[in-house]
Amino acid sequence: MMALAPLYTELADAPDGGQAHWRVCKDGVRIRLAHWRPDAARGTVILCPGRTEYIEKYGRAVREFVDAGYAVVVNDWRGQGIADRMTPDRLVGHVGRFSDFQHDVAEITAYADELGLPNPRHLVAHSMGGCITLRALMNGLAVKTATFSGPMWGIHLTTVMRTAAWAATTVLNPMPIRGMLAPGADPKPMVETESFAENRLTGDPEFYDFMINQQRVVGDFALAGPSVAWLHGALREMRTLSKLPSPKVPCLTFVGTAEDIVDPARIGDRMARWGNGELVTVEGGKHEIIMETQARRDLFFGRTLAHMGG
């Protein structure tokens, strides 16, 4: 029997009927997974968050998919949410090796299998989740379709900043301080340091307040900047992935015209090489297309559900 984990349904504005469990990955790290299963579900959405995120942030997205008749699985990646944190300072976003996230992906699919969640399965991934799951797709993750929101296939950095990040993390990564905050990274969560007018996540003030409130209520959700090891590993993984051919899974990718957290040029390059893929540019959209203004959310969910089969 799987051990139950907390799930803050009301805080998430998620549909009733969800349940969360603790799962221990192959390397001993404990992560949290949650699922929803409507009656006569027509398939399963594997919904993978970005860096700093957690299950409850996607409660409203879960509602959209459940209302459309899909079962949904959402995860807390290792090092964030209330999964195991990898350093004594729980605000530092750390992972030993970027490839360790693939243990989490394996546990997500095992969880869906053990629950008997129905096929076909559809991947929906945001930001860092898009980097992790692109690798998983290349490794044979079995899904019928893939949808990405602002995928982290490159980080939005100036040439000088990128060169400095590579240099600093290459020097520091082998050292004992690799688990410490990367040079220049924010020591506080983004929603604590950026006002709505300054924020780079969403053009919807109510959704921004929703994000802030969740971290006020559950302080353990909070996560600040990445560690030296995370940044070095992410840069290496994005560079490696950029050189590999695209998977054959049908793909739909969204990027906002106001995106400045991930690199739109890298997204455009990947989608230009994805034979059965389509890039959707969202006018005025910031990083969190899934949590944007109503019209932008309607575009995302309308196109995504059609892509999945209606």
Image (spheres, helix red, strand yellow):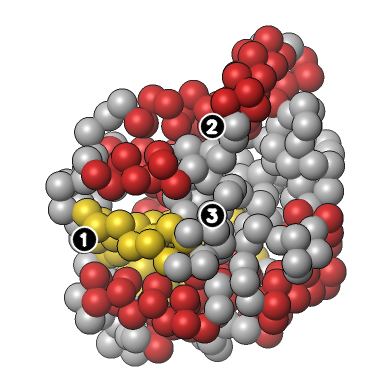
Q: What residue sits right under mark 1 in the picture? A: 144
Q: Residues within 10 Å of mark 1 (few under 14, many from 20)?
A: some
Q: Residue under circle 2?
A: 234
The disc, 2 or 3, on the residue closer to the chain's N-terminal end is 2
Identify which residue is drawn at 38% across, 45% down: 267
Q: CA distance from mark 3 to mark 1?
A: 28 Å
Instruction: Give coordinates of residue 108: x percent, y percent.
Output: 43, 54
The amino acid at mark 2 is Ala
Left or right relative to 74: residue 269: left
Identify the disc placed on residue 170.
none
Q: Is residue 20 visible?
A: no
**Whole-percent x, y for residue 285 in the image:** 51, 66
Q: Is residue 275 left or right of residue 217?
A: left
Near-viewer residue (104 or 63):
63
Q: Nearer the N terminus, badge 3 or badge 1?
A: 1
Dots 2, 1 in contact, CB < 8 A: no
Q: CA distance from mark 2 to mark 1?
A: 26 Å
Is residue 42 something that shows in the picture? yes
Residue 259 circle label:
3
* Image quadrant in which the C terminus is located: bottom left
For mark 2, give the secondary structure: helix
Residue 97 sits in quarter:
top right
